[in-house]
Image (spheres, rainbow, N blue to C red):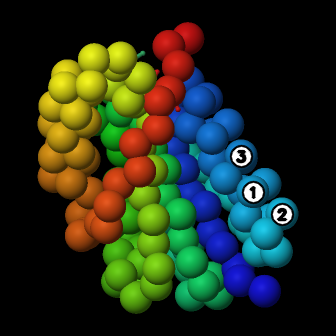
């Protein structure tokens, strides 16, 4: 059974809800899932991810920036993260823009901002529409 770690960061709660939905979907397909809010990790330096087969990372975008606690987690664990299958999803309102050309432009700008903030190379970033509270 694949052990999957999901680490997310969220300011208003949407990314946490989406991470929970991903966790339930993975569990229903047989994975053992550990869901963690990066804000709850006491020591990023000693947090061990070696016992996990796969990692999913999630963050939300505010004024072009993702949460610092997720960036810190990735920075502390990047050597181990780079050695496993690792997915990244980003929650943002730009993904809900009805105008396709504007949406694509805004998502490309968001992706470029995120890649600059994350201290390791990421594969494709899954963009998920959030909600304004
Ligand atoms: C102050 C503020 C700034 C935001 N900035 C952006 C932004 O730059 N780009 C974007 O697409 N969405 C932006 N959003 C929308 C959020 O990404 C969206 O509300 C998301 O669902 C928040 O996720 P969270 O609840 O997990 O924090 C912003 C929302 C707020 C409240």
Q: CA distance from mark 1 to mark 2?
A: 5 Å
Residue under circle 1?
25
Q: Label 3 crowding class (10 Å Cα cut-off): few <14, some 14-19, many 20+? A: few
Left or right of residue 84, residue 110 in this image = left
Name the quarter where the C terminus is drawn.
Answer: top right
Whether residue 71 is visible: yes
- The residue shown at (47%, 30%) is 129
Left or right of residue 42, residue 110 in this image = left
For label 1, the SS is helix
Classify the position of ligand 1 by quadrant: top left, top right, bottom left or bottom right: top left
Q: CA distance from mark 2 to mark 3?
A: 11 Å
For label 2, the SS is helix
Comparing 65 with 47, the one in front is 65
Instruction: Report if the CB atoms under discs 1 and 3 are less than 8 Å apart.
Output: yes
From the top left corner, tell me how far across and down residue 11 is, in percent. 51, 29
Instruction: Report if the CB atoms under discs 2 and 3 are less than 8 Å apart.
Output: no
From the top left corner, tell me how far across and down residue 94 is, in percent. 33, 25
- The residue shown at (35%, 54%) is 125
Comparing 120 with 45, the one in front is 120
For label 3, the SS is helix
Instruction: Report if the CB atoms under discs 1 and 2 are less than 8 Å apart.
Output: yes
Residue under circle 2?
28
């Amino acid at each position: 059974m694949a052990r999957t770690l999901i680490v997310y960061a969220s300011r208003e709660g949407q990314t946490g809800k989406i991470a929970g939905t991903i966790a339930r979907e993975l569990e229903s397909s047989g994975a053992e899932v550990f869901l963690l809010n990066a804000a709850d990790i006491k020591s990023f330096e000693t947090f061990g991810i070696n016992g996990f087969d796969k990692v999913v990372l999630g963050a939300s975008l505010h004024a072009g920036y993702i949460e610092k606690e997720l960036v810190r987690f990735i920075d502390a664990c990047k050597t181990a993260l780079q050695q496993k299958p690792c997915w990244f999803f980003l929650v943002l309102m730009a993904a809900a823009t009805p105008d396709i050309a504007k949406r694509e432009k805004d998502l490309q700008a968001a992706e470029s901002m995120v890649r600059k903030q994350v201290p390791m190379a990421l594969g494709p970033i899954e963009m998920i529409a959030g909600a304004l509270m």
